[in-house]
Structure formats: structure tokens, C-alpha cells
């Protein structure tokens, strides 16, 4: 495994998450970091302004041609540019790109979801070249499908595909929840893939949390790898996600006992 850290950040404004953004910049000064961002809330806002309806299936946005045009503009043109500029303001050299650039993300169309694709591979040499140059790749979740059509990609899926393709030891998914909870509502400190699947089958993990957990599982390509789902709005969120085993929920690639509730 590599010491590359993959961070998935939500797509709200920098002002809304300035604290965690400062943390990302600090970590990037001494460890290779790839930042993958979403933009769901802002895409929805723009779709509403333009009168384009939004529809979700299993926590994923169904994307037609009109919605894709908005999503691509918001993700690559607005959110990505803001994040790159924000890192530069904090003294970090960053490069903005999407999964379309250089064929970075290899993807396949998701049936019945419209212009939505699932990541199945990574052209890692492109990211390696950026990282070797001491820069931070900031990746927008877009990709071409097997027919060469540009598609929307769930940001968690994109982050997981990058983490797996790079052999990253850690994927940190900073989100708006504090982790995964059991049937009694207690947050779990750690979870294996098998335990996560059992919670999905029982309906405990449901809705938009299912694709997030499935993405976390996909990142666990190596023994000792871990994916951490944590609350990005908490104080010192990134540092605690990396160092505090009682913060958020850790999904692990090796068998371990599920920790008690926090």
C-alpha cells in the first residue's frame, strides 16, 4: 500500500467547510493527497433555478442530458475551480481535473440511471505524475462510459476507485453524518465488509448511505486498508478521522471485531 491519502469532500462552498479545508492543506504539505469532491447540493440548487427536476434512485441521482449539462458545469466549472483556488490561497499547489481528463477514470454505464457511470478502473500514471510534482490533484466526479459518452459519477464511487487504483492505505469520506449506526442507533467505531452487508440486508443501512458504504468497501483492495466515514463539520475532523479510532466509522479490509458504540 502507498501512503497516499484520498479525501472525499462534499460539494458545499469553501466558506461552509473552511476549517476542514485548512486541515487538508496542512496534511498535503507532508503527505501525498488526492482530493475528490462532490457537488450534489449545489447541482440540485442549479437544477431548481433552471426548472430541471431531480430524481434519485437508491441514493443516486438519475441523470438525463439536461441534468448532465448542469452537473458538469457545476462540478468542473464551479466547485472544482473554487477548491483549487482555495488550496492555492493556503499555499498548496493544486491541479484541477475531472475523471474525463486524460481518461483518468475508467467507467461503465449504470443501467436505468441515465447518464451515470460506475468506476471500474483508473489511469494512475496521470495522478502519479501530478503527485510526484508535489501537487494535489483535485478531481471532479465525471467520466466517459464504455461508449465514450461523458457521464455523472457518484463522488464516493470516484473516490473509492481512485483509492483502490492507487493502493492507498486510507480513504477519508468527510460527509454530513458521524458514521454508521447499528439497529439500535449506536454509532459503530469499526465495521468489516461482511458486517456492513448484513446491516444493508437488514435495512439498517439504507437510502443514500448504501452507495456510500458500498464505495467504502470498494476502496479496501489491500489488507490493512481502511475507509473512514466521518462528520466533516466536526472540530478537527480530518485529524480525528486519521488518528482517533473512536471518531466516525472505520471499514477495514481485514477481519476485526466490531467496536462498541460510541
Image (spheres, helix red, strand yellow):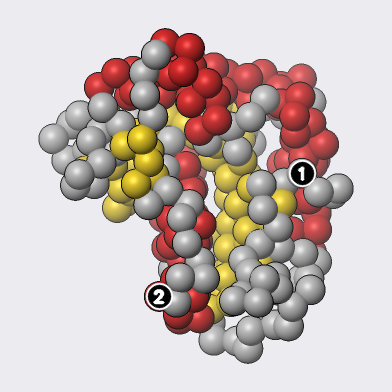
The residues bearing labels 2 and 1 have C-alpha atoms spaced at a distance of 29 Å
- Which-is-in-front pick, marks 2 and 1? 2
Q: Between 218 and 135, which is closer to the camera in this rendering?
A: 218
Q: Between 4 and 56, which is closer to the camera in this rendering?
A: 56
Q: Which mark is residue 233?
A: 1
Q: Residue at x 80, y 58 (%)?
A: 240
Residue 103 placement: quadrant: top left
Q: Between 243 and 115, which is closer to the camera in this rendering?
A: 115
Q: Residue at x 55, y 30 (%)?
A: 41
Label 2, residues with CA under 10 Å away: few <14, some 14-19, many ≥20: few
Q: Residue at x 33, y 24 (%)?
A: 68
Query: Does 253 sit above or below residue 24?
Result: below
Q: Which residue is mark 2?
A: 201
The image quadrant where one finds the C terminus is: bottom right
Q: Position of residue 170 (x, y in %)?
A: 60, 60
| For residue 130, side relative to residue 259 (left or right) | left
Q: Position of residue 196 (x, y in %)?
A: 49, 74
Q: Answer yes or no: do the residues labelled 2 and 1 have beta carbons within 8 Å?
A: no
- Report the number of discs: 2
Q: Residue furthest left?
A: 147
| For residue 227, side relative to residue 47 (left or right) | right
| For residue 188, side relative to residue 117 (left or right) | right
Amino acid at each position: 500500500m502507498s501512503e497516499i491519502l484520498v479525501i472525499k469532500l462534499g460539494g458545499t462552498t469553501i466558506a461552509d467547510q473552511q476549517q476542514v479545508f485548512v486541515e487538508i492543506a496542512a496534511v498535503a504539505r507532508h503527505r501525498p493527497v488526492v482530493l475528490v469532491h462532490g457537488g450534489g447540493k449545489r447541482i440540485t440548487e442549479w437544477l431548481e433555478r433552471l426548472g430541471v427536476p431531480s430524481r434519485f434512485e437508491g441514493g443516486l441521482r438519475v441523470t438525463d442530458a439536461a441534468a448532465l449539462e448542469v452537473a458538469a458545469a457545476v462540478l468542473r466549472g464551479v466547485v472544482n475551480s473554487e477548491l483549487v483556488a482555495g488550496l492555492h490561497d493556503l499555499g498548496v499547489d493544486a491541479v484541477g481535473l475531472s475523471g474525463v481528463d486524460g481518461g483518468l477514470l475508467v467507467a461503465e454505464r449504470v443501467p436505468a440511471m441515465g447518464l451515470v457511470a460506475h468506476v471500474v478502473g483508473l489511469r494512475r500514471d496521470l495522478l502519479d505524475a501530478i503527485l510526484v510534482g508535489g501537487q494535489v490533484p483535485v478531481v471532479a466526479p465525471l467520466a466517459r462510459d464504455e461508449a465514450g459518452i461523458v457521464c455523472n459519477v457518484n463522488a464516493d464511487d470516484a473516490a473509492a476507485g481512485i483509492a483502490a487504483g492507487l493502493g492507498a492505505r486510507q480513504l477519508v469520506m468527510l460527509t454530513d453524518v458521524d458514521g454508521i449506526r447499528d439497529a439500535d442507533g449506536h454509532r459503530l467505531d469499526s465495521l468489516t465488509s461482511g458486517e456492513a452487508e448484513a446491516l444493508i440486508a437488514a435495512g439498517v443501512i439504507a437510502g443514500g448511505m448504501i452507495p456510500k458504504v458500498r464505495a467504502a468497501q470498494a476502496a479496501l483492495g489491500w489488507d490493512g486498508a481502511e475507509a473512514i466515514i466521518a462528520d466533516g463539520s466536526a472540530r478537527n475532523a480530518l485529524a480525528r478521522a486519521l488518528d482517533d479510532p473512536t471518531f466516525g466509522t472505520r471499514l477495514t479490509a481485514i477481519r476485526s471485531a466490531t467496536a462498541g458504540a460510541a
